[in-house]
Each structure stands twice: as C-alpha cells, then as structure tokens.
Image: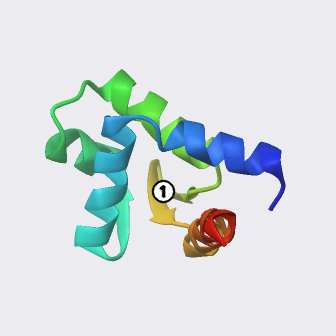
Amino acid sequence: MDNKKIEKISRALSDASRIAILQQFKKKKDCLYCAEVNDLLDLTQPSVSHHLKQLVDADLLIPEKEGRNLKYVLNPKVLDEYIACLTDLKD
C-alpha cells in the first residue's frame, strides 16, 4: 500500500462519525443500508451520505446496488492491509 492510500484511509478514519459507522458493521457482521445508518446514528441523511462517500473513496466500504437502494459492505482486505502498514511502522 502506498503512502497516498495510507493518507486517504487515515483521513477517512479521522472522524468520529465514520468510526461509529464502521463499528456498526462490526455489530451487524454483514451489510448496512444508508437508511439503517441513519437510524443507528443521530445524523442527518446528507451527513450520513457524506460519511459513507468518504469511506467508499478510501476503499473501506464497497457499495452494492440492490434495486433502488445502495447497500454497503466492509472491505476487510483494505482494512487488513492498512493495519499491516501501521504495524510495520512500529518495527
């Protein structure tokens, strides 16, 4: 993973709301719909959309079209690579 990708992920993870969204994926262990995120967090719909876009742009979430709705799944590969890069920094 290059430094630019590490920076993009770090910026995406620098917001408490985005961390809270990712924590919901841990609880759900599957996928989340935008409306579900709205219901789980005390955020407006435009705010949720903004945070989801930031996580998608960092490749932490993968959007999947399901009918007229978008569902999001966690991208564990990118998250694992990011964690490995951070772990390498301490060695």
User: What is the basis of the colouring in this image?
Assistant: rainbow
Residue under the image location 23 percent in, 29 percent down = 43
Which SS class for mark 1?
A: loop
Residue 69 drawn at (x, y percent): 43, 50
Q: Where residue 75 appears, x then y in whole percent?
A: 57, 68
Quadrant of the image for the C terminus? bottom right
Q: Residue furthest right?
A: 2
**Is residue 88 shown left or right of residue 17?**
right
**Of the pair 91 and 66, the residue shown nearer to us:** 91
**Between residues 33 and 5, which one lies in front from this camera angle?**
5
In the picture, which quadrant includes the N terminus? bottom right
**Residue closer to the observer: 82 or 70:** 82
x, y percentage for residue 54?
55, 37
Image coordinates for residue 38, horizontal then vertical, percent: 23, 39
Q: Residue at x 35, y 48 (%)?
A: 19
Residue at x 32%, y 37% (from the top left corner):
16
Which residue is depicted at the point 57% across and 57% down?
60
Is residue 79 left or right of 81 when viewed as pictured?
Answer: left
Q: In the rendered image of this protein, does residue 50 appear above or below residue 9?
A: above
In this rendering, position of residue 29 left or right of residue 72: left
How many dots with numbers? 1
Q: Which residue is mark 1?
A: 67
- Among the 4 quarters of the image, the one containing residue 24: bottom left
Is 91 drawn above or below residue 23 in the view shown? below
Amino acid type at mark 1: Gly
Is residue 82 toward the left or the right of residue 33 in the image? right
